[in-house]
């Protein structure tokens, strides 16, 4: 993964993007790509790139062009089938100067236009600039693994992998919260693209292409999830569950192989101790050059710790295993840096330990790691899917005394399970049972629980929201075929559209990895793996309440039996308690001070003061409600976003040297040999 950025004039004027602006943008992204830097500047457009060298270390510098220099690209990500695509393109007469996957994308676009993107297997965000046609193309991978933000200001389009680079480009770009973005965060835990958290700055939708030409903007989807529309519908898997396990195993093995071998640097693997990462790491060992390097998080809080299972898998792999132990104080200490990289509020501290884990990976000299992310979405591993199934079962006979007892089989991993008190559980999970056949039913409880935090919002912010309903607005964007999918497929689609892209792959994924220049790869989000998973009958994925049923069959005789048989334990971390006690950092009290709360304008200062007093009073008991946990973390993170990005303008050190320096404005200079290092002026 790398960092990309650019500026394009949309009005046809001759207001040339400045070198200083492009250098500031690349300076803001240097953590994403510290190895090499490059810029291209023409009369209408400027491109900038910060490179993390993973493939073609010698000749893969960017910005990169076609043979005649009329088509330029900045690319962030990896194309895992680029060798096969290159062979196809060579048969069509295309010639290559590098061994990079980036150049394959350039020629693929020349050959197939926008249709090229559907042929790519990988993870990416890219910008293509056609000099002659004056056409800009932005594109993002199917699931939004690679980030891409954009805004229009004074007739110019600014785009970048991270918002901080857009702010660095021009201090005149307004820096303010977007009220609807905040409402989405405090409903879905994240914004849903194109919605952003800052006014005027949007995020490209996953699986989409966006083009700018002659004052026109066009958006199109090159990929959308597809699920069978009936038990006998087209595209539905016809074999047995054993047949499905064989196909999934073969596809997953190919996906892991691609992601291990498609690199000119060593590839490691995260190991959480759960099924997904254990399966990925076990398959990865087959393709590792030498010992596989594995990395795990430990917690001093026993409720969150999975050391026993992590070490068990590491021993079975014979991997070179590395661990980092995280306590509450460490979470609080790094939280401001974490928010600098998430660039948005978060309601859980879970990204913070992953920030520290990627720091460990960097110290060990590894640039790429595989993770098990995506398995829960594609193979139905989350509690929200089981909740939805139980509640729909209950809803058929809402007066039944027996059916709601199945709720007690949920959340076996929680010390304070929400189903431990029967009366409260029935009241909570029995909400809106009459709506069991409506879109969003399974997610309704989580969304409304999170939205209850909006009582902390200031009157000023409420006025800006002006009665807007974030849930209704999102549900209005569901595809026409949605109602013809199975209930489980509907729940999976919503989870992918909301939590996966904006939180798990961004705040908890790419941003924590790239904070320390680490690229994450996700075999479970491979195009073939997902295609098979989406075609499976619901009962192959969620059999009764046995989540990821077919994946467990895949893992038989592959991972240790103890991993297969253990109770599910999702990744979690200590939340509000991290910010309380003798080790509380000074910034916490300061950021929650009434003056700073009022300055940000998001929350009512009196409500925040009451919340803070309540949390301090209960800290001794070591226990908070789920709502108070989210509230405190959400307030702290929002205040930190305001402090870092709105109240203060981010400043960055521009690179002293460039590997690529193409300037077609200053004396028509054009450096064709991208391997030549030239001084930045």
Image: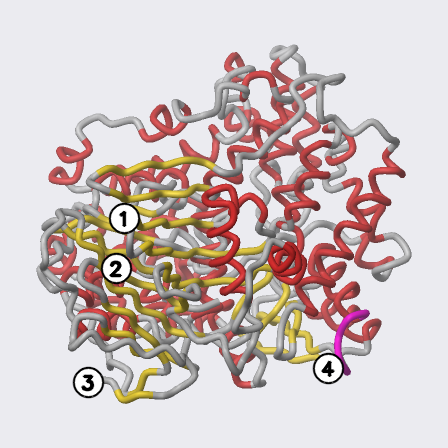
Circles 2 and 1: CB distance less than 8 Å?
yes
Q: Which mark is residue 681?
A: 3
Whichever of labels 2 and 3 marks the residue nearer the N terminus, that label is: 2
- From the viewer's perspective, is residue 18 above or below residue 125? below
Whichever of labels 4 and 1 marks the residue nearer the N terminus, that label is: 1
Circles 3 and 4: CB distance less than 8 Å?
no
Magenta stretch bounds: 286-290
Tell me, yes or no, if residue 311 can be seen here. yes
Q: Secondary structure at mark 2?
A: helix
Choose mark 2 or mark 4, whichever is in front.
Answer: 4
Q: Which mark is residue 320?
A: 4
Q: Which mark is residue 197?
A: 1
Choose mark 3 or mark 4, whichever is in front.
Answer: 3
Q: Secondary structure at mark 3?
A: loop
CA–CA distance in space, label 2 to label 3 = 33 Å
Q: Nearer the viewer, residue 651 or 146?
A: 146
**Viewport quadrant of the C terminus:** bottom left
Whichever of labels 1 and 3 marks the residue nearer the N terminus, that label is: 1
């Amino acid at each position: 993964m790398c960092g990309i950025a650019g500026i394009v004039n949309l009005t046809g004027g001759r207001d040339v993007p400045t070198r200083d602006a492009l250098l500031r943008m690349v300076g803001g992204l240097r953590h994403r790509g510290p190895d090499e830097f490059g810029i291209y500047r023409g009369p209408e457009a400027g491109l900038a790139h910060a490179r993390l060298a993973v493939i073609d270390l010698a000749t893969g510098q960017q910005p990169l062009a076609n043979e005649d220099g009329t088509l330029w690209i900045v690319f962030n990500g990896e194309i895992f089938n680029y060798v096969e695509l290159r062979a196809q393109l060579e048969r069509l007469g295309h010639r290559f100067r590098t061994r990079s996957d980036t150049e394959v994308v350039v020629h693929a676009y020349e050959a197939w236009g926008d249709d090229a993107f559907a042929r790519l297997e990988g993870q990416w965000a890219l910008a293509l600039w056609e000099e002659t046609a004056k056409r800009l193309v932005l594109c993002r991978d199917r699931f939004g693994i690679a980030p891409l933000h954009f805004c229009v200001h004074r007739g110019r389009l600014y785009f970048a992998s991270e918002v901080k680079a857009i702010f660095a480009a021009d201090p005149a770009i307004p820096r303010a919260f977007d009220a609807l973005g905040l409402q989405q965060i405090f409903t879905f835990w994240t914004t849903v693209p194109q919605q952003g958290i800052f006014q005027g700055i949007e995020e490209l939708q996953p699986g989409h292409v966006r083009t700018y030409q002659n004052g026109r903007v066009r958006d199109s989807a090159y990929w959308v999830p597809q699920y069978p529309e009936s038990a006998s519908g087209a595209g539905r898997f016809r074999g047995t569950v054993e047949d499905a396990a064989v196909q999934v195993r073969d596809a997953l093995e190919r996906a892991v192989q691609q992601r291990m071998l498609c690199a000119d640097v060593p590839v490691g693997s995260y190991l959480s101790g759960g099924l997904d990462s254990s399966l990925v790491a076990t398959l990865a060992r087959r393709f590792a050059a030498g010992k596989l390097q594995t990395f795990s998080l430990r917690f001093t809080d026993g409720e969150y710790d999975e050391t026993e299972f992590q070490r068990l898998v590491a021993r079975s792999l014979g991997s070179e295993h590395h661990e980092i132990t995280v306590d509450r104080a460490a979470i609080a200490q790094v939280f401001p840096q974490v928010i600098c990289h998430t660039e948005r509020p978060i309601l859980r501290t879970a990204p913070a330990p992953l920030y520290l884990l990627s720091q460990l990976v960097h110290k060990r000299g590894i640039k790429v790691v595989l993770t098990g992310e995506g398995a829960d979405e594609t193979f139905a591993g989350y509690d929200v899917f089981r909740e939805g199934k139980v509640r729909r079962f209950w809803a058929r006979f809402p007066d039944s005394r027996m059916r709601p007892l199945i709720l007690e089989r949920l959340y076996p991993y929680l010390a304070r399970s929400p189903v431990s008190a029967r009366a409260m559980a029935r009241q909570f999970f029995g909400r809106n049972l009459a709506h069991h056949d409506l879109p969003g039913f399974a997610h309704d409880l989580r969304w409304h629980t999170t939205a209850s935090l909006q009582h902390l919002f200031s009157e000023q912010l409420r006025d800006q929201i002006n009665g807007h309903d974030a849930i209704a607005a999102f549900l209005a964007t569901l595809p026409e075929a949605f109602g013809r999918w199975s209930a489980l497929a509907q729940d999976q689609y919503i989870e992918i559209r909301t939590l996966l892209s904006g939180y798990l792959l961004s705040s908890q994924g790419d941003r924590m990895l790239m904070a320390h220049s680490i690229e994450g790869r996700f075999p479970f989000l491979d195009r073939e793996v997902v295609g098979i998973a989406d075609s499976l009958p619901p009962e192959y994925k969620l059999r009764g309440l046995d989540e990821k049923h077919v994946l467990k069959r895949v893992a038989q005789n592959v991972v240790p039996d103890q991993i297969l048989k253990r109770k599910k334990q999702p990744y979690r971390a200590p939340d509000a308690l991290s910010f309380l006690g003798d080790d509380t950092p000074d910034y916490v009290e300061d950021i929650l001070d009434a003056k700073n709360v009022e300055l940000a304008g998001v929350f009512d200062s009196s409500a925040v003061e009451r919340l803070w007093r309540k949390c301090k009073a209960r800290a001794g008991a070591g226990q908070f409600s789920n709502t108070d946990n989210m509230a405190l973390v959400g307030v702290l993170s929002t205040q930190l976003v305001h402090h870092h990005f709105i109240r203060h303008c981010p400043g960055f050190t521009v690179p002293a040297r460039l590997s690529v320096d193409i300037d077609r404005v200053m004396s028509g200079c054009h450096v064709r040999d991208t391997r030549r290092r030239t001084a930045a002026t």
